[in-house]
Amino acid sequence: MLKTLLCGTALLALTAGAAHAQVSNNVIKIGVMNDRSGIYADLAGEGSAIAARLAAEEFGGKVAGAPIEIVVADHQNKADIAANTAREWIDAGNVDVIADVPNSAAALAVQGITKDKKRIFLMSGPGSTDLSGKSCSPYGFQWTYDNYAMAAGTARALVEQGKKNWYFITADYAFGHSLEDETSKMVKQLDGKVAGNVRHPLGNADFSSYLLQAQASKADVIGLANAGGDATNAVKQASEFGITQSGQSLAGLLLFISDVNALGLQAAQGLLLTTGFYWDTDEQTREWTKKFEAKAGRKPTMVQAGVYSAVRHYLKAVEAVGSDDPDKVAAKMRETKVEDMFTKNGKIAANGRMFHDMYLAQVKTPAESKAPWDYYKIVKTIPAEQAFLDPAKSGCPLVK
């Protein structure tokens, strides 16, 4: 009897050990990398880490028998720092997944490393379409938005209003170039034209010379192909120059709710923007936002909501396959629909692009806003197939 009991105990221990061994290093380690101190800190930063922790909490802090650990790092909007951090995390820190990474140059560097080292990369912050295009990866998932989606929303809406002549003020790095390029293609596709462009350094404070050049172009629309602090500085200074009062339209091609909050409704009112998430869409978004706001002290941006959704979907895949094996998990993620407060019936294409509906929104006037952070009127829902580029046209070699 004792011998049988001992054998049974040994078998149980062996089975439990084997099951637990399916998770490398007996921990699921997720690294949230972004700008934690610069121009993109408000739209991502600690809020993205909070969003990832909320996803982990839904699983009780454990999945497939292993604890979930969240680590964070500041890439300072520098591709070399992002690359070095990714290597260190993977080689020395046993990080299984890297999440967020706003700044397309940084994300492209991390994409190359995670591809070579077979680690899952959950991109919420970067916009370059190359990440699900020519630089795609079997382990890379572009989740929340991309620059094509911004053009398909905001630029299309303005051109359809008859505003066909555009001039761009562009952040001079991979993201800005991509956003200008995608928007230019959309404008020309709709029989509009581009009058010219000017480029500014990342983290620019004074936009006066750029705005004067844009004003002198007499273009119908001045497109701001930048984001974060650069976008808010440009909008504030455009207001001071009286640009919209003189008849030109200002298009913030990538604006976040944190930007509107920083600008105030007096300066931001009337702006059209495209977003993948708005906290006040339905009961589910409002409930999740309460949890986020209790920890962050503010409403979430679409990037932060996207981090939650991507991390949650990853953890569901780990739970389903009982392992953190990157090939098995990536396959399960692709075959499973994304269903959460961020999106309904989301689907991941072969190039890693997560297809979901986007929203065209207009910033409310001060009189229309009834409460703090009551900033958007949803003008229309943009179906996923219209919002994002056909994977067959993306240039991704994974698409057959």
Image (tube, rainbow, N blue to C red):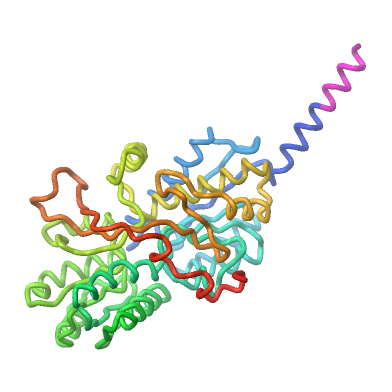
Q: Is residue 76 visible?
A: no
In front here: 85 or 342? 342
Q: Total of numbered circles in the picture?
A: 0
Q: Residue at x 66, y 48 (%)?
A: 324
Q: Residue at x 15, y 83 (%)?
A: 215
In front here: 212 or 305? 305
The quarter in which the N terminus is drawn is: top right
User: Is residue 8 located in the magenta-colored stretch of the structure?
Assistant: yes
Residue 290: image quadrant is top left
In front here: 183 or 231? 183
Q: Is residue 120 above or below residue 374?
A: below
The quarter in which the C terminus is drawn is: bottom right
Is 78 placed left or right of 294 in the picture?
right
Q: Position of residue 63 (x, y in %)?
A: 60, 38
Q: Outermost residue toward the top?
A: 1
Q: Position of residue 309 (x, y in %)?
A: 46, 48
Residue 78: image quadrant is bottom left
Q: Residue at x 53, y 70 (%)?
A: 109
User: Is residue 121 located in the magenta-colored stretch of the structure?
Assistant: no
- Magenta stretch, main secondary structure, is helix
Q: Is residue 235 above or below residue 180?
A: above
Is 130 placed left or right of 262 in the picture?
right
Q: Is residue 305 visible?
A: yes
Q: Position of residue 62 (x, y in %)?
A: 58, 36
Is 148 placed left or right of 208 in the picture?
right
Q: Position of residue 121 (x, y in %)?
A: 55, 58
Is 241 placed left or right of 143 in the picture?
left
Give the residues in magenta. Answer: 1-11
